[in-house]
Amino acid sequence: MDDAREVVAAYWAAAEARDWDGFAGLVAEQVVYEAPQTRERVRGRAAYIRFNAEGFPGDWHLEVERIAGQGRHAASWIQMTDAGQRYPGLCFFDLDEDGRIARITDFWPEPYEPPAGRSHLVERY
C-alpha cells in the first residue's frame, strides 16, 4: 500500500481487531507517536506496539468517521467508545518512502493526565 488513506484505514482496522502483528506491519521501525494533550511521545515500532497493546486496557472500540489524505499524508477522525462513553479523536499521519507510518500526532478532545501504569512506555515532554 502506498496511498496514505489505505494505510490509515488498515491501521484503524488492525487497532479495532487488536491485530498487533498486522498493526506493526503498517508502522515504520522508527515511528514517532505524539499526543500533545498528555505531552507523551513514543519512539520506535516495538515501543509503540507495546504502548497500544498494554496502554489501553478495556473493551474499547473504534469507528472511523472520515479519512482524508493525499500521497504520503493523511488525517483521520475517529470515535472511540469505552464504557458507554464516546470520545472523538483526530489523528495525523505521515508515511515514509516505503509506505509505512513514520509519524503520528494524536489529538483528543481535552487535555488530561495520562492513565497510571503506562509511564514506563512513554517519554513525557
Image (spheres, rainbow, N blue to C red):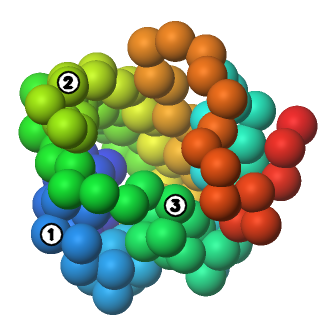
Q: Tell me the tag on residue 17.
A: 1
Name the amino acid, label 3.
Answer: Gly
Q: Quadrant of residue 23?
A: bottom left
Image x and y of residue 77, in percent: 26, 26
Q: Distance between the Cα atoms at labels 2 and 1?
A: 18 Å
Vertical placement of residue 73 versus 75, above or below:
below
- Nearer-N-terminus badge (3/2): 3
The residue lying at 67 percent from left, 29 percent from top is 113
Q: Residue 10, located in which quarter of the rendered image?
A: bottom left
Choose the circle earlier in sequence order: 2 or 1.
1
Q: Identify the residue under disc 2.
A: 86
Screen quadrant of the N terminus: bottom left
Inter-mark Cα distance, 1 to 3: 16 Å
- The type of residue carrying mark 2 is Arg
Horizontal side, residue 53 vs residue 96: left or right: left
Q: Which residue is mark 3?
A: 55
